[in-house]
Image (tube, helix red, strand yellow):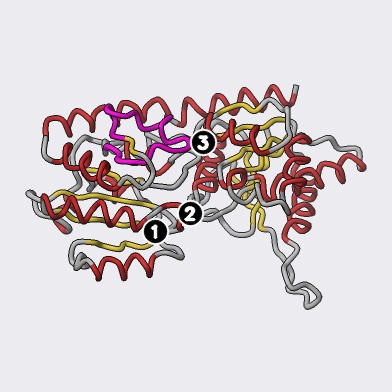
Amino acid sequence: MKIGIVLYPTYGGSGVVATELGKLLAKKNHEIHFITYSQPVRLGSFNENLFYHEVRVSDYPLFDYEPYETVLASKMVDVVKHENLDLLHVHYAIPHASAAFMAKKILKSQGINIPFITTLHGTDITLVGKDPSFEPVITFCLNQSDAITAVSESLKNDTYKHFSTDCDIKVIPNFVNLDENFFTGKKSKLRKKYASDEESILCHISNFRKVKRVKDVIKIFNKVNKATKSVMLLVGDGPERYLVEEFCRELNLSSRVVFLGKVRDTSKVLELADLFLLPSETESFGLAALEAMAKGVPVISSNTGGIPEVNIHGVTGFLSNVGDIIDMSENALYLLNNKEILNNFSQNALNRSKEFNIEKIVKEYEKLYYEVLN
């Protein structure tokens, strides 16, 4: 098949999933054409069957805001026509689904039929999509999609709750590439650069937005560190970072908290960790938690959105109510103070991650592609 994948090219979960999916489809001899405004961060170097088409928006003085959706639709029309694509797979509804619908109608007027599949990832439904100014367009484009997928049952239910659609939404979860992230069961030697053998390492990865509750991460760590000397590794960047740095100074934790910033290969950081913290307000899936589990790292998380579909309470980690810092801290200390139990949870986390191996999930997408084309 010749597949056009439309995505955001940044570090966000939707872009990572779309890129990794395309890379594996290319290895399976499908021809993949990424369509976006810059090269996806996970795309890497030249690969057979992988192509990148840049959407370029001109700086025209008439526009206060660049008309990306219109230019994207035009680029999709161009790629479909000249690369003879079979279908389009758009990740994140806004504005990709509406651009795909526009491209489909233009191509139909030229005698070309191109189906498109929309994959919902989270905030396109639970946050941005609920904005009244977006809702009518999102509802329309969902209903016009040839197929819709969601990354969790939780997100599927939210979509039905907030949008007037009776479309059959298929749940195809996010995934982890276990071949590229093979875990030997041993902690990286780099660990000694950050902590002694007697100290524990906790980790958090996010885009440092309010919904991630990164200050809660620091509050949890503060309680843990008072009970057992530990180090906190923070990966990522975003609008809350400065406030979190200030908060660490207020608590005299600056020497115990390491801000690593944006890291392309987060698996190298996760190999150092004993626990992963994810106290988010909401998560459509919890891809960062899954990637931690693939490195044998148990997860201390909130019990919200799609996280319980990934992190199994009392097996791969623990779930707590959003904002329950005390319970999360106690759960973290329970594991850190019981090495045998921690090791059991670590193995459980690794085993659970294998259920989300990309090799398994990509077959579900391939099956859906053929169903849509037929």
Question: Three-letter amino acid code at disc 1?
Answer: Gly
Residue 353, label in figure: none
Front residue of 47/8: it is 8
Q: Is residue 109 magenta?
A: no
Extent of the magenta region: 298-318
Q: CA distance from mark 3 to mark 1?
A: 25 Å
Say which mark, if any, is on residue 11: 2
Mark 2 Cα shell of 10 Å, populated few (<14), some (14-19), many (≥20): some
> Vertical placement of 158 versus 78: above or below?
above
CB atoms of marks 2 and 1 within 8 Å: yes
Residue that carries the numbered disc 1 in the rendered image: 236
The quadrant of the rendering that contains the C terminus is: top right
Kindly report which numbered mark, 3 or 1, lies closer to the viewer in this rendering: 1
Q: Position of residue 332 (x, y in %)?
A: 21, 42
Residue drawn at x 76%, y 47% as measured from the top left: 137
Numbered circles on residues, count: 3
Mark sitting earlier along the chain (3/1): 3
**Which mark sits nearer the N-terminus, 3 or 2?**
2
Q: Amino acid at mark 3?
A: Leu
Residue type indicated by callout 2: Tyr
Task: Specify whether 255 is left or right of 295.
Answer: left
Give the secondary structure at mark 3.
helix
Circle nearer the viewer, 3 or 2: 2
Specify the quadrant of the image occupied by residue 292.
top left
- Under circle 1, the secondary element is loop
Q: Which residue corresponds to the image point at 40% horizontal and 55% vertical from the top-left?
A: 264
Which residue ends up furthest to the left in the rendered image?
A: 198
133 or 202, which is in the foreground? 133
Closer to us: 208 or 4? 208
Q: Is residue 263 above or below residue 121?
A: below
Tell me the element at label 2: loop
